[in-house]
Image (cartoon, helix red, strand yellow):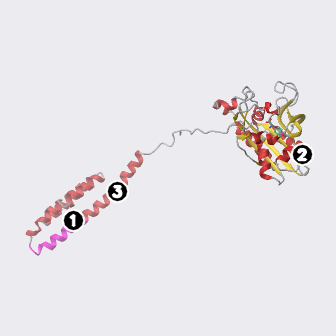
């Protein structure tokens, strides 16, 4: 029996050496050391041994088992590492291949211009306010000194939802809303970017467009403050050599009122097609806040004064980037948008 065991050990060790895969080793283990394995088969014959022989054979059997178990464990370890290495090798990725580029979006030119306008006015101490696009007739017109039958309403052909509710035609209602909210405190120093709506649609008008409103109220605000703020804005937006020109105009909510021009960005004031040979481009309306508007907003026009202005963002963008058709700004053609 001892012979048998030694022979088994030798045979097993040779076979084990030939195992190439984890699977083979596991199968080998069952075959030799399992419940019905070859070692167990040999040990079945233990009963026929003499009492003196038994412990000797038992010890030898244990040695054979332990030695095989040890070799199996070692081999399993090596094979597992080898198999893992092979797997990693076969699954490796070629990092020298060019990647699939992710499509990256970019800011719309109108958003860029709005942000730039905001930055400039924040630099002068203005804060940003917003208001609803669906607006009450009261804030859009009445509180701005535009009563029901006022002809100025014709200038702002409007989308009405009910007789008292409309899509705001300008950002000026946020003047009234802010005064109502802030009264009687000064200073009020805000700009209001946002969408506005009118019944217009051609190369220079869109039914939806953007404005930035400005309002400043404090003690002793004068027309010269308005001019200073606007000149500063024009220079930061369009260049340090910018000039501005104020022409008398009319708005129901300001008195006096002005239309504000900047020197033509194309010809620098010489005269060209863009500025119709005048050298000037109109960019905004402005004026001193009408005493009645201050009053309706809860301020005493004897104590405080203010200025206001409103500009069209599309127009500023078109002038800044030399865009000749406003509709390009809304068609979302990426070939156009990529240029900014
Ligand atoms: N709300 C005017 C418009 O849409 C623009 C405007 C003019 C706003 C004069 C003002 C202002 O605040 O003072 O045509």
At label 2, counting other C-alpha atoms closer than 10 Å, the crowd grade (few under 14, some 14-19, many 20 or more) is some
Within the image, what quadrant is residue 44 found in?
bottom left
Mark 1 highlights which residue? 64
In which quadrant will I find the C terminus?
top right
How many numbered circles does the render carry?
3
Between 54 and 191, the residue placed more toward the observer is 191
**Label number found at residue 246:** none
Distance, label 1 to label 2, CA atoms, is 104 Å
Residue mark closest to the camera, 3 vs 2: 2
Whole-percent x and y of residue 140? 76, 40
Residue 5 vertical position relative to residue 289 in the rendered view, above or below:
below
Between 241 and 119, the residue placed more toward the observer is 119
Mark 1: secondary structure: helix
Magenta stretch mostly in which secondary structure? helix
Residue mark closest to the camera, 1 vs 2: 2
In which quadrant will I find the N terminus?
bottom left
- Residue at x 89%, y 35% (from the top left corner): 245
Q: Is residue 76 left or right of residue 153?
A: left
Q: Compare marks 3 and 2 and give the one earlier in the sequence.
A: 3
Looking at the rendering, the stretch of residues picked out in magenta corresponds to: 50-66
Between 107 and 168, the residue placed more toward the observer is 168
**Residue 295 part of the magenta-drawn span:** no
Mark 2 highlights which residue? 225
The reply to whether the residue tagged 3 has its Cβ within 8 angstroms of ligand 1 is no
Within the image, what quadrant is residue 64 found in?
bottom left
Whole-percent x and y of residue 5? 16, 64
Mark 3 highlights which residue? 78
């Amino acid at each position: 029996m001892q012979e048998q065991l030694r022979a088994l050990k030798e045979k097993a060790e040779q076979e084990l050496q030939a195992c190439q895969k984890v699977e083979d080793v596991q199968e080998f283990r069952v075959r030799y050391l399992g419940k019905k394995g070859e070692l167990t088969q040999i040990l079945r014959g233990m009963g026929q041994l003499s009492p003196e022989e038994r412990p000797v054979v038992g010890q030898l059997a244990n040695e054979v088992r332990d030695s095989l178990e040890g070799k199996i464990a070692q081999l399993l370890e090596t094979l597992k590492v080898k198999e893992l290495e092979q797997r990693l090798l076969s699954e490796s990725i070629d990092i020298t291949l060019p990647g699939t580029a992710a499509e990256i979006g970019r800011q719309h030119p109108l958003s860029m211009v709005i942000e730039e306008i905001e930055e400039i006015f924040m630099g002068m101490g203005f804060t940003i306010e917003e208001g609803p696009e669906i607006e009450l007739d009261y804030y859009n017109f009445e509180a701005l000194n535009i009563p029901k039958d006022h002809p100025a309403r014709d200038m702002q052909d409007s989308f009405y939802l009910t007789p008292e509710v409309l899509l705001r035609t300008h950002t000026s209602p946020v003047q009234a809303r802010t005064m109502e909210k802030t009264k009687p405190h000064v200073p009020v120093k805000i700009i209001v970017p946002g969408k506005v709506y009118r019944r217009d649609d051609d190369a220079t008008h869109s039914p939806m467009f953007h404005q930035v409103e400005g309002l400043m109220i404090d003690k002793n605000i004068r027309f010269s403050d308005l001019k200073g703020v606007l000149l500063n804005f024009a220079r930061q937006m369009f260049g340090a050599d910018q000039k501005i020109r104020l022409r008398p105009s009319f708005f129901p909510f300001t008195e006096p009122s002005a239309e504000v021009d900047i020197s033509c960005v194309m010809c620098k004031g010489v005269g060209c097609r863009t500025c119709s040979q005048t050298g000037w481009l109109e960019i905004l309306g402005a004026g001193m806040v009408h005493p009645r508007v201050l009053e309706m907003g809860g301020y005493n026009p004897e104590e405080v004064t203010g200025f206001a202005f409103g500009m069209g963002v599309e127009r500023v963008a078109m002038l800044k980037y030399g865009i000749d058709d406003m509709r390009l700004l809304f068609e979302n053609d990426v070939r156009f948008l990529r240029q900014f």
